[in-house]
Image (cartoon, helix red, strand yellow):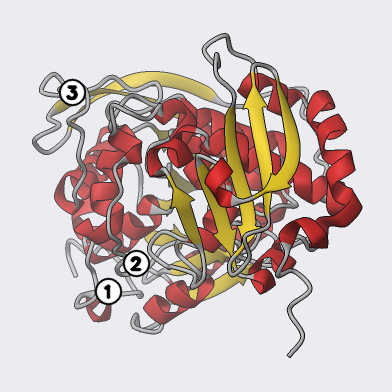
Amino acid sequence: MASHAWSDLPAALGATASKVEPLMARDAQFKAFTTSNAIDVPATFGIKSSGSENTVLVTVANGHGTVGHGTPDKALFTLSALPEQWEQFFKPTPAAPYQSYWGMFGMNIKQKGIEVLGDQTSFAHWAHVWRRTLEILHEAYCGPYAEEEQVEPDEDYITGRYVYLMAPEPWGKCKIFYEQSGSGTQDIVFLHTAGSDSRQYHGVMNDSRMRKICNMYAFDLPGHGRSFPSKSYYPGAHTNNEEVYVGTIASFVKKLGLKKPVICGASMAGQVCLAVAIHYKEVGAGGTIPLQGSDYLNMERQWYDRSPYVNQSLFNPEWIYGMMSPTAPHYNKQLVWHTYSAQAYGIFHGDLDFYFGGWDGRSRMKDIDTEACPVYMLTGEYDWSNTPQMSQATADKIKGAKHKSMPQLGHFPATEDPARFVPYLIEAIEHIQATRRDVDDAKG
């Protein structure tokens, strides 16, 4: 039986190896990640196909890298995958989840055949470097990703300010930052993902189509982005749950006097959109658009995102970077990286208390009244944490709910490619407006 063409990774890459070091030398991101006098001892990691000892060895020193081949015992850690998985990864535009090693490795959804050999903490330490190295290897083998271009605006239409909210305990009274744009008649509130902030929605909130039909708001949760932490907060002790999350959204809607707003958010915010649909009267919501949402996710938690041995400002953005479409505009992917790097210690991990296992709506989806609070779910196909199939399975449990998969988008559709995302968003808003029961539920 003939061996797979990718069973020996160095051999499969062939002449690609000679292109890698010059690309590393010219690559501004690789230089930024590796230029530090703290790298006083070179570090070597490996990349190989499972079942083979022949390994691509990458050695990183201060400001530069070298590539050779050898065996895994020469490396601090080695990224191993099945030959057919590497074959998918090295396609010009990989299909999900092969756009990144993290996607192949998985979180809640594990891919068979993937394993990290050697020192696991070193694997986390060097996540930013091995990720960029794999991208350079991909470019050397089949050229740069066909990333989309986008028109850069000359004007910004967003204004921001602070407001005090009374959130449920343990958050309590909080000084919250929010932004607004648009002059349309439909109020809509955008919610950011776990461990990030509402800068994710600037592309959508500046879009002329959205500004015409919507009155848009986005706020940072307490302790996130530009919002202040609550007075009861101890750095590193953040956590999130359904009651406090839904209550904070309700407090924001009430404080600003919004009229049956549509609530829209991705990831953990996609999940809370489902919770809002359950509690629509309490929140005052007139519809929800869960992005990358489902009724339940769980996983064995890892602690690299809240570890004294790992730099969260490097690790956290790396963990989520590979959830995006490889063809998304480069600047937007960098923005997602930046906002995840910018959050305080423990914020991301605490939000994941809700995202992974803390939220469980499995028994309650049947109770959602989509005549009073329509639900239109949207899921980017490159999300390997919450797949379109998972969202569809949830939508199928909700009478009257809609779901659509979005090609060429991933876990952060509003940020990755706003121009591609907005038509889906407008379709969802129009569906909500057309199907919502226009009565005063408090009197009904």
Closer to the camera in the image, 129 or 265? 129
Determine the secondary structure under disc 3: loop
Q: What residue type is labelled 2?
A: Cys
Query: Which mark sits nearer the N-terminus, 1 or 3?
Result: 3
Residue 407, by quadrant, is bottom right
For marks 1 and 2, give the CA distance: 8 Å
For mark 1, what is the residue?
A: 368
**Of marks 1 and 3, the one in the foreground:** 3
Q: Name the residue under label 3.
A: 230
The reply to whether callout 1 and callout 2 are in contact (CB within 8 Å) is yes
Q: Quadrant of residue 364?
A: bottom left
Task: Count all numbered tags in the image, as a single digit.
Answer: 3
- Taking the spot 28% from the left edge, 57% from the top edge, the residue there is 356
**Disc on res. 373:** 2
Closer to the camera, 387 or 67? 67
How packed is label 1: few (under 14 Cα within 10 Å), some, or many (20 or more)? many
- For marks 1 and 3, give the CA distance: 32 Å
375 w.r.t. 126: above or below: below
Element under disc 2: loop
Q: What percent of the width, then of the height, locates residue 91?
A: 79, 63
